[in-house]
Amino acid sequence: MKDIGRDGLDSAFGQRSRGVGLTLAVLLAVLLVAAGAYAERDVALRDGRLYVDGQWVFLKIGKSLIDYGNAAAVDKFIENLDVLEKKHYNAFEFNCYWHHFDKDGDGEIDVSLAPLSTLIDAVAARGLFPCLSVETYGVGGGTVPAPFWERHPGAVAVNAQGKPVSDSEYGFGSAVPSLFSSEYLRVSRAFIRNLTSGIPHEKLLYFETTVEPQYIGNQSLDYSVHARRAFEEWRAANKAKGGPWPNGFPIPDHFIKNPVWNRFRAQALAQWVNGDAAVFRAVAGDDKWVAVDYLETGGKEMRNRNGRSFTFLQNLTCANILQVNWHWHLGRRAPNNTAYQTVSSVMKITKRPWAVTEHMTFNGSDYTPEEAPAMLRNTLARGTRFGWEFVNVGASSNAAFSLYNDDWSPKPLIAVVDDHWDEWMAEVKQK
């Protein structure tokens, strides 16, 4: 296998444009070159690897948690592309929050998409890979625009006590939508469609559906009228014996734990993800790649999160790339291989050729430099051949989640990667 370190990337991508200027003339020239150069590259997924013009390229994916609807923040990111490219990043995932782009929650884009489009063009001009992710849920940091709730208060998820749900697990307090609400699905997917339509989507390597798809870990849901309707329709169509739906609240424990109810929940969660992926592809093309996070702690709360992990993955028909989380057990400070094992089992049964990687291989706050080498080697041992993802790729000495200091010098955790990149690539190419 050809060396895929710095020299290998230069060979694979050819001579790359450097120092993207912000003047109109320079930017226009770069974009014209990029348009032709991008179209000429042959990209393929085979055996969990990305091939570019026939050569295996291992991705170093940077995710920067900025507001991509903010022109000043995006301009600053473009200015820092030289720095990031020198750190061997060859792909960037732009995480677009619904409320940053759609201020009134009607699914329409309310801010200019020109900054995001310019960023995508600038990344592609360098022969690097731009990717797009969205957050349209209300757990773990995503936020549904507040005006949506003013128009559709009944779209909220309901817990087993009959109460509307907010994100009490991750501490954000954001309202959690019911995945069975037709209004939530209609408007959130309109946002996805309008965002994708308004940017140069043909230059994106892959699209990622909402981060860490789940219901929530510390509550049992959803018991809204929307969920009841969907369950009863599913039960009739599948001639399932589970149920019937409880007469009132609180929902009894025997129904919460009922395997038929949880099979329905697992399938429904997967269908939500599949439906969002279909919106991306309706705009960008049926052959576009979709990445999906797979949140798996291996803990008892997983029934709350997804009903049943194996069933969820079995019904996840849209994915090309599976991004495992959590891959490191934060209690035992050791590998958490439950997710990898479940993914491997489903791939074996379904024959799906998923490329395996991680959601946040590293983030700036959860891991230590001492355990980092064992973490990386375990990802390779468990099948990661696509690349590693690092969050937050931003320069802030005081922000715990950021991997870099104000001057872009690496903090100790990411220094394990940055200062030894060629050595890590030597290990990767042996797999």
Image (cartoon, rainbow, N blue to C red):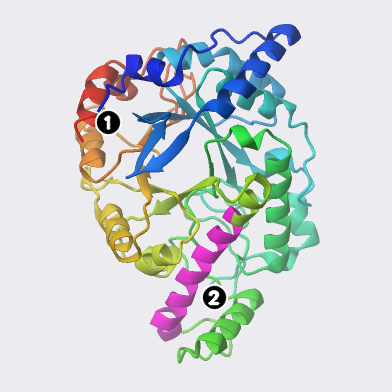
Q: Is residue 312 above or below residue 226?
A: above
Picture quarter with the N terminus:
top left
Is 416 on the left or on the right of 247, as rendered? left
| Comes first in the chain, label 1 or label 2 | 2
Give the Cα distance between marks 1 and 2. Answer: 39 Å
Residue type of the residue flagged with mark 2: Gln
As drawn, the label of residue 368 is 1
Q: Is residue 192 above or below residue 36?
A: below
Q: Is residue 328 above or below residue 296?
A: above
Q: Position of residue 340 (x, y in %)?
A: 28, 52
Q: Is residue 384 above or below residue 87?
A: below
- Bounds of the magenta span? 253-277
Residue type of the residue flagged with mark 1: Thr
Q: Position of residue 249 (x, y in %)?
A: 56, 82
Q: Residue at x 51, y 65 (%)?
A: 269
Q: Position of residue 154 (x, y in %)?
A: 72, 68
The answer to whether residue 431 is visible is yes
The answer to whether residue 245 is visible is no
Is 249 on the left or on the right of 420, as rendered? right
Residue 269 is inside the magenta segment: yes
Give the labeled residue for mark 2.
161
Q: Residue at x 64, y 23 (%)?
A: 35
